[in-house]
């Protein structure tokens, strides 16, 4: 369950937003000040922040910058401040959206859904541990800090694995999605060869990332 931090000093509005979010399946942390928001942020795994600008102990802009300096968490402003310079300040502080009060709860929920899905996808674009680093966006693979040369087909395999971490990818599904550099369809034998070559490049005896589910397909277990 994804957790949303609501930072809004209007108690009734805070409760109303929280109620709608809970009905939509989110966990909610509701606070009324920046200080309480910082405490809640440090104690919980927050996935998104709904943030007012005018708060009793300061402006939301400063809290947003504080959050972004710690880790990349999506922030959406909910505010009555409708001046263009305020909206620009909100985006400059690192926010994903700037919503003017009053707002439609249905539209707000849709915006939240889109932002959270985008955030999940963004996280999946990079895999890193003490041994392996993969950056899908920049097509970069490092093994023990050294750049690893992989083929276009191997990279497309990596992309499928990382975007579907933990899910079984059947042979048929991978065959539908993979094409070699010449635009030719990859058959099951070529798929197995490419998976084995990829495993040979990124795995060793202590580090296993790709599991062969016999007779069915492959799964990223890293």
Image (spheres, helix red, strand yellow):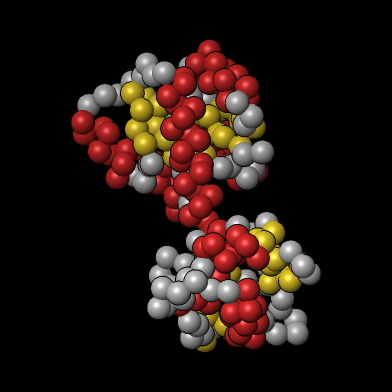
Closest to the observer, 106 or 99: 106
The residue drawn where x is 57% and y is 66% is 175
Q: Is residue 123 above or below residue 146?
A: above
Which quarter of the rendered picture does the C terminus lie within?
A: bottom right
Q: Residue furthest top?
A: 12
Count every numbered label the image shows and give the total: 0
Residue 160, image x, y percentages:
55, 63
**Percent position (x, y) of residue 83?**
22, 26
Residue at (63% x, 22% y) in the render: 23
Q: Please determine whether, in this image, residue 4 is positioned above or below residue 70.
A: above
Of 74 and 194, the residue lying toward us:
194
- What residue lies at 68% left-to-right and 57% top-to-bottom? 167
In the visual, does 33 lie left or right of 53?
A: right
Front residue of this view, candidates 107 and 13: 107
Q: Can you name the residue that lies furthest to the right here?
A: 214
- Relative side of 195 to 214, left or right: left
């Amino acid at each position: 369950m994804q957790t949303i931090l609501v930072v809004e000093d209007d108690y009734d509005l805070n409760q109303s937003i929280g109620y709608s979010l809970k009905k939509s399946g989110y966990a909610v942390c509701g606070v009324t000040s920046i200080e309480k928001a910082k405490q809640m942020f440090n104690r919980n795994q927050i996935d998104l922040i709904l943030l007012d600008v005018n708060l009793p102990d300061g402006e939301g802009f400063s809290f947003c910058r504080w959050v972004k300096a710690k880790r990349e968490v999506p922030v959406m402003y909910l505010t009555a401040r409708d001046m263009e310079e305020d909206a620009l300040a909100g985006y400059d502080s690192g926010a994903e959206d700037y919503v003017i009060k009053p707002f439609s709860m249905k539209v707000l929920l849709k915006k939240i859904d889109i932002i959270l899905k985008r955030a999940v996808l963004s996280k999946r674009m990079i895999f890193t541990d003490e041994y392996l680093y993969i950056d899908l966006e920049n097509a970069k693979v490092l093994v023990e800090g050294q750049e690893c040369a992989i083929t276009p087909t191997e990279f497309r395999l990596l992309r499928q694995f990382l975007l579907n971490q933990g899910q079984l990818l059947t042979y048929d599904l991978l065959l539908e999605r993979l094409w070699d550099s010449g635009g030719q369809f990859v058959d099951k034998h070529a798929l197995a060869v490419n998976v084995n070559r990829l495993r040979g490049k990124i795995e060793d005896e202590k580090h296993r990332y790709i599991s062969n589910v016999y007779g069915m397909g492959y799964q990223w277990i890293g």
